[in-house]
Amino acid sequence: MTFDRIDLKILDLLQRDATMPVAQISDQVGLSQTPCWKRIQRHKEAGTIRARVALLDPDAFGLNLTAFIMVEAMERTREWRAEFLSVVATLDAVRDVYRLAGSHDFLLRVVVPDTAAFDALLEDLTARARIRSVNSLFALERVAVRPQLPLSTIVLGR
Amino acid sequence: MTFDRIDLKILDLLQRDATMPVAQISDQVGLSQTPCWKRIQRHKEAGTIRARVALLDPDAFGLNLTAFIMVEAMERTREWRAEFLSVVATLDAVRDVYRLAGSHDFLLRVVVPDTAAFDALLEDLTARARIRSVNSLFALERVAVRPQLPLSTIVLGR
DNA sequence: GCTGAAAATACTAATAC
DNA sequence: GTATTAGTATTTTCAGC
């Protein structure tokens, strides 16, 4: 699967506003509707476009606290990781899971209503998964949260 | 702006798949099309639905490295924060910015092609913003990344 | 608040160029 | 790749309950 500048432009528009009609996209990228639509289809089938979703306002639901949990594994084995991830998968508040290089093994982003809910989550996590240590970071403010990829930083090969 | 169980259900469906037709949503929540459509409109106007976007596959573009940068401020003043954020706003690779409680002041999530690009970014950041210290976390694996809110954890008041 | 149906719009697919 | 077409599905509005 390869891209040219037009593909990048189309995808960049769609990751900002997926409701934009094909007619408008094709105008902006300098194509007619048919090839533009075919490119979009191709990206959906290839999985480049993974989903189209609605982004909701966390504050509207009282989900006021975002926190990050850095987890240190009890042992650095494949078995431990599988065990840990199977516990984490049951925790709805855990939205993102990254496996890390360095002194910590996993970084979790969690979204909860308040510190009480966070406390309960941490209690649950540490009770059910064998963890050496946790280190939590609390967000006082979500200054910017953007799932969009920085496509402008991509340099196309020649 | 208040929600009932039906609103939560509608929004949960939309944050998983925004292409779902209103007819199908209304079926699943036990409403007919018009009231269901009106509720969706209301949420768009109220800002509960902030946007509808396409989620893209970072690996498809060679954006293989996600890293987190914990920043310690040179001074804990409003002026410093404004100055720092104005620099950060110019860095396309920085996707999320959280202001933190505790020993670090900001957490940045950055998406770059490789470690060389990360190095250049860090160089740029530290050259242009007055920063006391930075601490970077490298993701070896994106186990799960979900912008969706955990609406199932919400308990409705009575 | 709800239902049902009509109108406007956009999407999807196929055509010929 | 473009332009045009047509059929389908969806969105949106409008009546009425």
Image (tube, coloured by chain):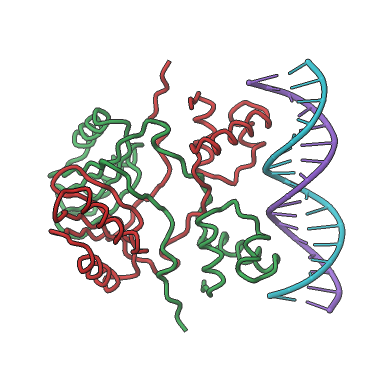
Chain colours: A green, B red, C purple, D cyan
**Residue B2 in view of the camera:** yes
Left or right of C13? Residue A131 is left
Is residue A14 or residue B60 the one in the foreground?
A: A14
Q: Is residue C4 above or below residue B53?
A: above
Q: Residue at x 37, y 63 (%)?
A: B92
Q: Residue B129's image quarter?
A: bottom left
Decide: is A80 above or below A120.
below
The C terminus of chain B lies in which quarter of the figure?
Answer: top left
Q: Which residue is at 70% across, 66% downward?
A: A34
Percent from the top left, x then y, of residue B68?
25, 57
Residue drawn at the location 68% of the way across and 30% of the way down? B34
Q: Quadrant of residue B88?
A: bottom left
Q: Is residue A79 visible from the viewing direction of this image? A: no
Residue A49 appears at what percent x and percent y?
Answer: 52, 58
- Number of dots carrying numbers: 0
Relative vertical location of residue A28 with respect to residue B99 in this rendering, above or below: below
Q: Position of residue B28 (x, y in %)?
A: 60, 31
Which residue ends up furthest to the bottom in the rendered image?
A158
Find the residue positioned furthest to the front. Answer: B79
- Side (left or right) of B105 relative to A40: left
Image-based side of B43 in relation to A138, left or right: right
Of residues A9 and C5, which is closer to you in this image? A9
